[in-house]
């Protein structure tokens, strides 16, 4: 490529991030800097994602610290915070992730709490999972997926009364209709795709003595996939 500008670098780094080739993305990022191409917000977002997808905690921390120090000429935005929380939570640094959320200069978004919840579910921190799930429900009370995850979590904890309270809440809010015609926003599903996929594989469907299942996660994912809201997923 004769003319390599920030846009071409961003495209390559983002591709490597999605391919979970974090080390190669970092190598190109350093070459980009050596060639005096100034990274922009998109570049740093792609790098933080590359670190998150490849488990490169220390490198991600360093990039975020550089953002905070003003090295690149702009402060971290909400998406940079989200990616860094995702990085920390994925790698099990849950308290650090929560501390970062509390220190955000703006109100945490659904994406931020979703990233924390996904990490908590992945690493089995049920108490913090509950905290994050309630934050999501407060932000999006019409989102079925958040209620489903919380109900299933209560089932795992043996808190059957709380699980049934969530189901009752869903009924009151009209969220237990046919999931095949779910009206949950695409934006919410984009945020929750990885969360629900991780939760789906984290534990078997939960049942209570009388055989009634409290796990609707596979059903929800299948319904959303059939609606085109999510890519097809192997759920069997």
Image (cartoon, rainbow, N blue to C red):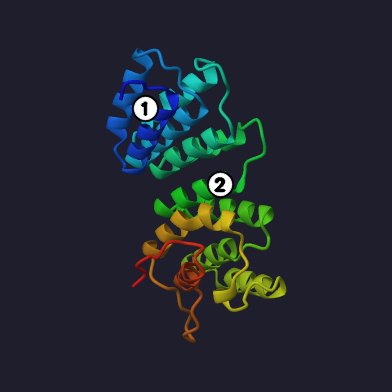
x and y, in percent, of residue 161 in the image: 60, 73
Q: Is residue 103 left or right of residue 205?
A: right
Q: Quarter holding the C terminus?
A: bottom left
- Residue at position x 44%, y 71% in the image: 218
Q: Is residue 30 left or right of residue 158?
A: left
Q: Nearer the viewer, residue 228 or 110?
A: 228
x and y, in percent, of residue 113 in the image: 56, 47
Q: Residue furthest bottom?
A: 210
Q: Is residue 187 above or below residue 52?
A: below
- Residue at position x 36%, y 43% in the image: 18
Check residue 59 in the rendering and tell me which mark sits there, or answer none. Answer: 1
Quarter of the figure with residue 10? top left
- Residue at position x 43%, y 39% in the image: 87
Q: Is residue 18 visible?
A: yes
Q: Is residue 120 above or below residue 202?
A: above
Crowd band around label 1 with a 10 angstrom C-alpha radius: few (<14), some (14–19), many (20+): some
Check residue 100 in the rendering and tell me which mark sits there, or answer none. Answer: none
Q: Is residue 174 above or below residue 133?
A: below
Q: Is residue 99 visible?
A: no
Distance (Cα) linking label 1 and label 2: 22 Å
Quarter of the figure with residue 202? bottom left
Q: Are marks 1 and 2 in contact (CB under 8 Å)?
A: no
Quarter of the figure with residue 34? top left
Check residue 111 in the rendering and tell me which mark sits there, or answer none. Answer: 2
Q: Is residue 64 left or right of residue 168?
A: left
Q: Is residue 6 above or below residue 177?
A: above
x and y, in percent, of residue 213 in the image: 48, 79
Q: Quarter holding the N terminus?
A: top left
Say what secondary structure mark 1 lies in.
helix
x and y, in percent, of residue 142 in the image: 67, 63
Q: Residue furthest right?
A: 172
Q: Residue furthest front?
A: 2
């Amino acid at each position: 490529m004769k003319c390599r500008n920030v846009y071409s670098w961003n495209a390559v780094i983002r591709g490597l991030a999605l391919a979970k080739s974090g080390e190669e993305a970092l190598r190109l990022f350093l070459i980009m800097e050596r060639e005096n191409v100034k990274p922009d917000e998109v570049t740093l977002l792609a790098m933080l994602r590359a670190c998150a997808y490849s488990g490169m905690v220390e490198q991600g921390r360093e990039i975020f610290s550089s953002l905070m120090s003003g090295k690149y000429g702009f402060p971290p935005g909400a998406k940079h915070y989200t990616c860094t929380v995702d990085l920390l939570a994925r790698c099990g640094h849950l308290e650090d992730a929560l501390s970062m959320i509390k220190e955000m200069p703006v109100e945490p978004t659904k994406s931020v709490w979703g990233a924390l919840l996904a990490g908590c579910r992945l690493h089995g921190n049920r108490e913090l999972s509950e905290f994050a799930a309630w934050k999501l429900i407060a932000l999006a009370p019409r989102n079925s997926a958040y209620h489903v995850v919380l109900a299933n979590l209560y089932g795992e904890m043996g808190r059957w009364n709380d699980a049934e309270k969530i189901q009752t809440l869903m009924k009151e809010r009209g969220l237990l209709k046919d999931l095949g015609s779910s009206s949950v926003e695409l934006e919410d599903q984009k945020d929750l795709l990885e969360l629900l996929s991780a939760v789906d594989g984290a534990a078997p469907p939960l049942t209570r003595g009388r055989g009634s299942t409290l796990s609707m996660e596979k059903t929800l994912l299948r319904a959303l996939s059939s609606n085109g809201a999510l890519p097809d997923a192997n759920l069997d």
